[in-house]
Image: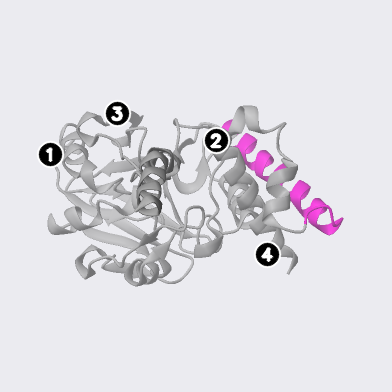
Amino acid sequence: MRRSALALLVLFVAAPALAQQAPPAATPPVGPDWSKVNVTTTDLGNRTYMLSNGMSGNVTIAVGDDGVIMVDAQHAPMHEKLKAAIAAVSPQPIKFLINTHIHGDHTGGNLAFAKDGVTIVAHENVKKRLAAGTTSNTTGIQTPPFAPEALPSKTYDGDGTTVEVKGRVAQLTHYRRAHTDGDTYIYFADANVLSTGDTFNNGRYQNSDWVNGGNLKGMIAVADVYLTIGNDQTKIVPGHGQLADKAQLKEFRDMMTTSLDRMTALIKDGKVKSEAEAIELKPFTDLDPKWAANEQSARTWIRIVYNSAKANLE
């Protein structure tokens, strides 16, 4: 009896302490309140517009005489707001939606727009990856396969193609292994507007998705191509960030080159032998004040550069 009573007493006293030491239950990440996220429309001239919301990828629209060409579709909850923004500048129906790549902040609206009768266009690699399901290179989060009706119904597997509505032509070009292995950039020559998708991010570090075929070497190469398109007045719609010009694009290109060259040298010299060692070394502290949105962004950039440099040396 005494031992039992003593055991109960110890358990009673220890229980609060044990409860305090127990790890808190995991809290699922909270997404944005989409009801409060609004679309901003920027007129780029010649019936061409940039639609942005600060949370998703930028959208480019080109208005023709009988329809609208749309580049990217943001997250799924933005469908109705994007339609309203487009209707505010044109009564014409959306005929084509071009996916610049696979990521959900650009393709999330596919299903809803497809149900509206919009033809989705992309490189064949985008369709293949969306159909199979994807894994994030930075978080490991898995995205399940897209529903068949949300997949691009018109694809191309060469270097490029065109999409047309009456009075407007979109020139689509594929660059292999840049942000992903399915990137398409779009040039509207009559408006001198270049839409890059996530191969360019104005003013911030940008992901190069090594799990889904990306590499910074390709992103640098495609930035060089962009610098030859149009002229100094070319308006550049980046995947994220404000409308850009070629001077801002060159800054982004030079930052990527500096980062990749520096990491490659560290690996070659044996100073960095793993992703963890690269993160611990913090090799881009001079670049972070301008390009890193926060500490996590700075760490992620190190991972991206390391994995590109490592792959290039193998």
User: Can you identify the residue that label 4 sits on?
Assistant: 311
Q: Residue at x 29, y 67 (%)?
A: 154
Which residue is painted at 50% across and 59% down in the image?
180
The answer to whether marks 3 and 4 mark residues whose Cβ atoms lie closer than 8 Å is no
* Amino acid at circle 4: Ala
Q: Earlier in the sequence, mark 1 or mark 4?
A: 1
Q: Is residue 245 left or right of residue 112?
A: right
How many numbered marks appear?
A: 4
Residue at image location 32% in from the left, 70% down from the top:
131
Disc number at residue 204? 2
Q: Nearer the viewer, residue 307 or 110?
A: 307
Label 1, secondary structure: give it.
Answer: loop
Give residue 62's quadrant in the image: top left
The answer, for residue 167, to whether it is visible in the render is: no
Residue beneath label 3, please? 40
> In the depicted view, which residue is nearer to us: 15 or 255?
15
Q: Amino acid at mark 3?
A: Thr
